[in-house]
Image (cartoon, rainbow, N blue to C red):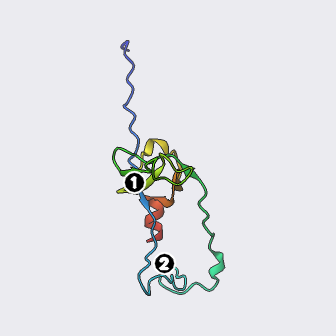
Amino acid sequence: MSDRSAIAPFTMPRVRYFRLNEDVRAGCWYLGNPQDSQGHEVEDPYVFIILVATKLIRCIDEQASKVQFWDPKHAPRGKEGTYYAVDDMRIDTSKVGNAKVFRTEDWDIALIVSEDIKEALE
């Protein structure tokens, strides 16, 4: 046995996150009747759990995203230095932990879901 211990490098699996948006075009706002995986209408639609996403995580990668901040001269009271707009949002996954559904702190209009949740919804 050598003096050096053989430790395999630890790699974290790559996790992707997506912003969940609703389609607000005319005629597209109605979700329709729930269907099972075979496309048949579900008899009791009340079997579904309602999602209330209240977990806030400070995880926006400000360098990789296009972030604009409120100008102190023009900001509403209390908004000085906070996000004015966040475009092309990127998430710093090192700050998310094992969360699968959450909102971004200080920009809570974004509902973020993990890739496995996105695929299940599709």
Which residue: 48% across, 60% down?
Answer: 110
Along the line of sight, the residue nearer the viewer: 73 or 86: 73
Q: Is residue 100 visible?
A: no
Which residue: 45% across, 60% down?
Answer: 116
The residue most toward the top is 3
Which residue: 37% across, 30% down?
Answer: 8
Along the line of sight, the residue nearer the viewer: 30 or 82: 82
Task: Residue 120: give x, y in percent of width and height.
Answer: 47, 67
Considering only vertical position in the picture, is 86 above or below 97?
below
- Dot 1 corresponds to which residue? 16
Which residue: 48% across, 42% down?
Answer: 95
Tell whether 53 sits left or right of 25: right
Task: Residue 80: give x, y in percent of width and height.
Answer: 50, 47
Quarter holding the C terminus? bottom left
SS at badge 2: loop
Crowd tier of the residue under label 1, counting other residues whose Cα lies within 10 Å: few below 14, some 14–19, many 20 or above: few
- Residue type for callout 2: Ser
Task: Residue 25: give x, y in percent of width and height.
Answer: 41, 81
SS at badge 1: loop
Considering only vertical position in the picture, is 87 above or below 50?
above
Quarter holding the N terminus? top left
Nearer the N terminus, badge 2 or badge 1?
A: 1
Mark nearer the viewer, 2 or 1: 1
Considering only vertical position in the picture, is 6 above or below 69?
above
Crowd tier of the residue under label 2, counting other residues whose Cα lies within 10 Å: few below 14, some 14–19, many 20 or above: few
- Residue type for callout 1: Arg
Query: Label 2 to label 1, Cα distance in Å?
Result: 24 Å
Q: Quadrant of residue 62?
A: top left
The residue most toward the front is 73
- Dot 2 corresponds to which residue? 37
